[in-house]
Amino acid sequence: MQAAQREALLDTLKARFEANMARHEGLAWADVQARLEANADKLRSLSEMERTGGEPDVIGQDAATGEFIFYDCSAESPKGRRSVCYDREALDARKTHKPENNALDMAADMGIDVLTEAQYRELQKFGPFDTKTSSWLATPNEIRQHGGAIFGDYRYGTVFVYHNGVQSYYAARGFRGALKV
């Protein structure tokens, strides 16, 4: 990442951090920035989160490791990550009308993790998020082995988690990511 891109990303992240202090009470931007500068490889992942519309922001700090936790905090599922099925196996199994990609491969390429159900519910405490869209969630193996995957959204003042076939994809369904720095 070039110096100008790095500075622009840090400026964006700082502005978002300062505009949303309720997401990370008690944390200081200077500490976040110092950790980011010491982990330059994580900046690429944050840049990809930003580029695809995720609007990453700090939502907390891991008490055990001291790492800052970033989630995609865009109001709706990130636009640059929609219309994807769940995983590679699902994508390969589609015979017609294949989407361009899948959530798990995209997340891996970006260097992030797909939010779990617990993380998604944690994010919704700062929300509401996904009032018009939905987001694939990391799916337990017991569900995936049956050909399904879970996704979440927020409707009627409630967080809903549902299931769908892994091969399905919709224009309004993407995925949200998490990154520890």
Image: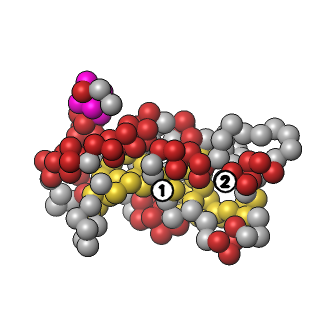
Q: Which residue is mark 1?
A: 113
Q: Position of residue 2 (x, y in %)?
A: 29, 26
State the image quarter where residue 63 is shown: bottom left
The residue type indicated by label 2 comes to: Asp
- Give, as a single range, the part of the protein colored magenta: 4-9
State the image quarter where residue 23 is shown: bottom left
Residue located at (26% from left, 73% from top): 64
The disc label shown at residue 161, or none: none
The disc label shown at residue 87, or none: 2
Dot 1: element: strand
Report if residue 132 is visible in the image.
Answer: no
Which of the two discs, 2 and 1, labels the residue nearer the N terminus?
2
State the image quarter where residue 9 is shown: top left
- Looking at the image, residue 153 lies above or below residue 76: below
Q: Is residue 99 left or right of residue 157?
A: right
Q: Position of residue 65 (x, y in %)?
A: 25, 68
Residue 8 inside the magenta-drawn segment: yes
Residue located at (66% from left, 53% from top): 87
Q: Position of residue 117 (x, y in %)?
A: 52, 66
Residue 87 inside the magenta-drawn segment: no
Residue located at (54% from left, 36% from top): 80
Instruction: In the displayed orientation, state which residue is furthest to the right.
Output: 95
Q: Report crowding for label 1: few under 14, some 14 to 19, many 20 or more residues within 10 A (C-alpha).
A: many
Q: Is residue 85 left or right of residue 39?
A: right
Q: Main secondary structure of the magenta part?
A: helix
The residue type indicated by label 1 comes to: Asp
